[in-house]
Amino acid sequence: MSAPSSPSSPSSPNAPTASPADLYRHSLQLLLDKDIAGWVDLWAEDGVMQFPFAPDGWPTQLAGKQAVAAYMQRYPDHIDLHDFPFLQIHETTDPQTIVVEMRGVGRMVETGGPFDMTYIAVVTIQNGRFYSYRDYWNPLAVQEPGADFTGSTR
């Protein structure tokens, strides 16, 4: 990640005392490190991930840590993330909820083509873990060859 957006390294980023922003920055570093198991460990057992703009055949909601793990397990086999060159985290009136604007770049493993995605996420932390994560991303990007790591039916 670029210097302005580099993740901080709290001693226990998933401890209840870690701020939502610190936990989120740590989660991005885990994705860059391709540590999907570590990323999933940041989730509450009953956490929910939602994809409001998911295209037909893709999941719109993942309920529970195990569903998130199953969804993410093959991610690094398809998308090789290199950096988050833009990251802006906004605090909200709820101290456990943040709104994140970011851009992830890398390459598509299957084709070697570029991966460049802009995201907005609304994330709520509960007891130091991701509890609610609404991921707003561009569904047109999954039309690229090699982008379908979820086994969708599109």
Image (cartoon, rainbow, N blue to C red):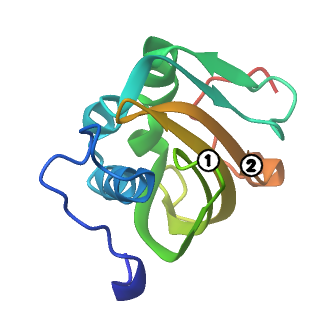
Label placed on residue 20: none
Q: Residue furthest bottom?
A: 3
Query: Where does residue 38 sit, x and y in percent of width and height?
Result: 26, 36
Viewer-side residue, 99 vs 148: 99
For the question of whether residue 29 can be seen, the reply is yes
* Disc 2 from disc 1: Cα separation: 20 Å
Mark 1, residue position: 94
Query: Where does residue 138 sit, x and y in percent of width and height?
Result: 78, 54
Q: Is residue 40 left or right of residue 147?
A: left
Q: In this picture, is 46 found above or below 99?
A: above
Which of the two labelled residues, at mark 2 and mark 1, occupies the earlier sequence position?
A: 1
In the rendered structure, which amino acid carries the disc numbered 1? Asp
Q: In this picture, is 6 found above or below 151?
A: below
Residue 77 falls in which quadrant of the image?
top left
- Residue at 33% in and 37% down: 36
In the rendered structure, which amino acid carries the disc numbered 2? Tyr
Query: Where does residue 150 sit, x and y in percent of width and height?
Result: 60, 27
Label placed on residue 136: 2
Callout 2: SS = strand
Viewer-side residue, 39 vs 140: 39
Question: Mark 2, residues whose alpha carbon is within 10 Å: few (<14), some, or many (≥20)?
Answer: some
